[in-house]
Each structure stands twice: as C-alpha cells, then as structure tokens.
Amino acid sequence: MTDTVLTGLDEGVLTLTLNRPDKLNSFTPEMLGALQAGFERARDDAEIRAVLLTGAGRGFCAGQDLGGRDPRNGGEIPDLGTTLDTYYNPLLRLIRGLEKPVVCAVNGVAAGAGANVALACDIVLAARSATFIQAFSKIGLVPDAGGSWLLPRLVGEARAKGLALTAEPLPSATAAEWGMIWKAVDDAVLMEEATALARRLAAGPTLSHGLTKRLINGAASRSFDEQLDHERDLQAAAGRSEDYCEGVTAFLEKRPAGFRGR
Ligand code: LHQ
C-alpha cells in the first residue's frame, strides 16, 4: 500500500484516508489499487470490525483524476469501460459486499465517482461545509461508481435526475434532509463523531451488523415475501451467534454486553 491512501488500525476500526489533498484526493489508478487493498484487508482480517473512510485536506474526493486523461496529449482514447471494470467496480462491490460496517466521513467536496464511493458506504456523515456533486454531466459522462443505482434509491428518481443532469452542488445539510446521507455535522466535530461511531459499531455485534447490511442491501431487488424468508434465514443464523447469547445474558444481568463479532 502506498501513501496515496493512509491506513491506521485502532480499536477494531481500519481508517482509510484518501491522501492526495493538493488535487482534492482525485482518484489515480495507484490510489484506487491501494483503496481496494484496504477493503480486501478489512474483509480478510477478523481483527478489523469496522472501516472508516475519509479524505485528507479540504476535500473528500473530486472523482477520477482528470489530469491523467488530458485529451490534448493525443494518442489513443482511453476505454472508460475498462477503467470501471479494472478499478471502480471491484472497489464498489467490495464496499457493498463487506459484511462489516463502513462509515464515511465526508470532510469536504465529494464529486463524480468520489461522491458515489461515499454513498456506497453504510453510514455517511458529512461536514456542514461539504457538498456532493454529480459532476459527470459537466464533462459529457454518465453517473458511474454505482451512482445510477444508488441515487434513485436514496433520494427518488426526480432528485436523482436533477442532481445528475444539472451537476449542481448539493449542500450536506440538504443531502441529510433528503435521506441521501445519515447526518451533516459541524466541521470541527466531524472526525470526532465519525471515529466514535465507527468504534461503537466495531465494539458491537458485528456478525449481526454484517447480516443486517446484507438484508438491507438486497431488499430492493426482492419481493416482500422473499424478504420475509430472507429475514427468517439470517435471524436464524444471528440467533446461533455467541453475540446473541451474550446480548441476552447481559440484558438479564443488567450489565453492558461484551460483543466479539462471533
Ligand atoms: C483535480 C480534480 C480532478 C484532477 C480537482 N482531477 N485534478 C471518470 C473517468 C474515467 C473512468 C471512471 O469514471 C469517471 C468518473 C468521474 O469521477 S468523472 C468526474 C470527475 N470529476 C470532476 O469532474 C470534478 C472536477 N473538479 C471540480 O469540478 C472542482 O475541482 C471541484 C468542484 C470538485 C472543487 O472546486 P474548487 O474547490 O474550486 O477546487 P479546484 O477546482 O481549484 O481544485 C483544487 C485542485 O485540485 C486544482 O489543482 P491546482 O493544481 O490547479 O491547484 C484542481 O485542478 C485539482 N482537481 N478535481 N478530478
């Protein structure tokens, strides 16, 4: 892993910090590879029980690094489909498929693929000064990084089309009002709140958190009947966990539960 993504592991939380602040953390292939490696580590290491994603400096992420794609340089036109297949889609699948909570602290502007990577996380907190921009239409592209799927589900078709077609910046407070993110918080307390939340989740029943994520991620593509069956199956699995046993015992003994994610 390189320093374009900083990593730290503390209290069961793997913190991944996008780190190209002079270019608003816009994604280079190297960075996307490092981010993917970070999420693979989170998937494979049982010590990691939650992930916190954020950005260094004044921005969260301005999407794809457009400097690396200067059309004035001539040469072959890059195939953006290959870029998505190679870098973005595996990353988005990792984030959504990770059976551990992913908290995103959006510390500043989140544009293009940067906005949609944030929205793919499970709980998004954003600084009050942050904005979300579906910047794609400004450069003749369509929403990617899962945005065309996530946005209409989060905010409805009318708002999704408005955001995607106008590329207008959406203030974080409005994003929270619309249900696009969990919360907008004062800039000064963003990292404190996001870290506390990630640590709280990491200390929780992370096996059931993972199953909850699986249930909600797949709900939109199942019927009500199918979802009831799925809830039954995953509740049966949760009910066999050590954490369920500990949770009920702790309740009856009137003490805090000590969950271990098993
Ligand atoms: C940047 C970038 C950037 C490089 C700011 N690249 N340097 C695309 C293609 C391929 C396949 C996969 O999918 C995609 C998906 C996408 O993500 S397409 C969307 C790409 N992103 C954009 O179109 C956003 C471009 N950036 C902006 O519109 C502005 O920078 C925003 C509105 C984000 C922030 O504006 P300001 O706060 O005014 O900052 P700034 O524009 O002055 O940027 C600061 C620096 O960061 C500046 O560099 P410099 O050396 O001049 O100080 C920018 O050039 C650089 N930067 N975004 N995407």
Image (cartoon, rainbow, N blue to C red):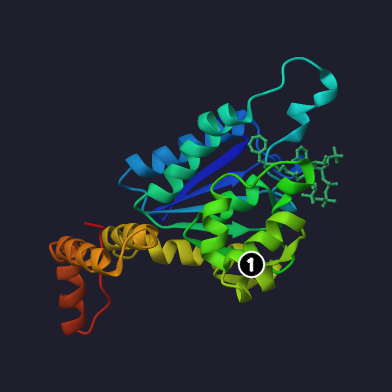
Q: Is residue 253 visible?
A: no
Q: Position of residue 262 (x, y in %)?
A: 21, 56
Q: Quadrant of ligand 1?
A: top right
Is disc 1 placed on a helix, strand or loop?
helix
Q: Which residue is mark 1?
A: 158
Q: Residues within 10 Å of mark 1 (few under 14, many from 20)?
A: few
Give the left or right position of residue 49, taking residue 73 as reference. left
Q: Is residue 140 visible?
A: yes
**Looking at this rendering, what residue extends furthest in the top direction?**
75
Reply above or below: 38 against 143: above
Q: Which residue is rendered at x = 58% and y = 51% of the image?
A: 147
> Which quadrant of the structure image shows residue 49?
bottom left
Q: Nearer the viewer, residue 192 or 102?
A: 102
> Which quadrant of the structure image shows residue 238?
bottom left
Q: Which residue is rendered at x = 66% and y = 60% of the image?
A: 161
Give the left or right position of residue 222, taking residue 28 as reference. left
**Looking at this rendering, what residue extends furthest in the right direction?**
72
Give the left or right position of residue 65, taking residue 39 as reference. right
Q: Position of residue 38 (x, y in %)?
A: 47, 39
Kind of residue at disc 1: Ala
Q: Which residue is rendered at x = 61% and y = 73% of the image?
A: 178
Q: Position of residue 98 (x, y in %)?
A: 38, 48
Reply above or below: 235 against 106: below
Reply above or below: 171 against 58: below
Q: Position of residue 136 (x, y in %)?
A: 71, 46
Q: Nearer the viewer, residue 56 or 170?
A: 170
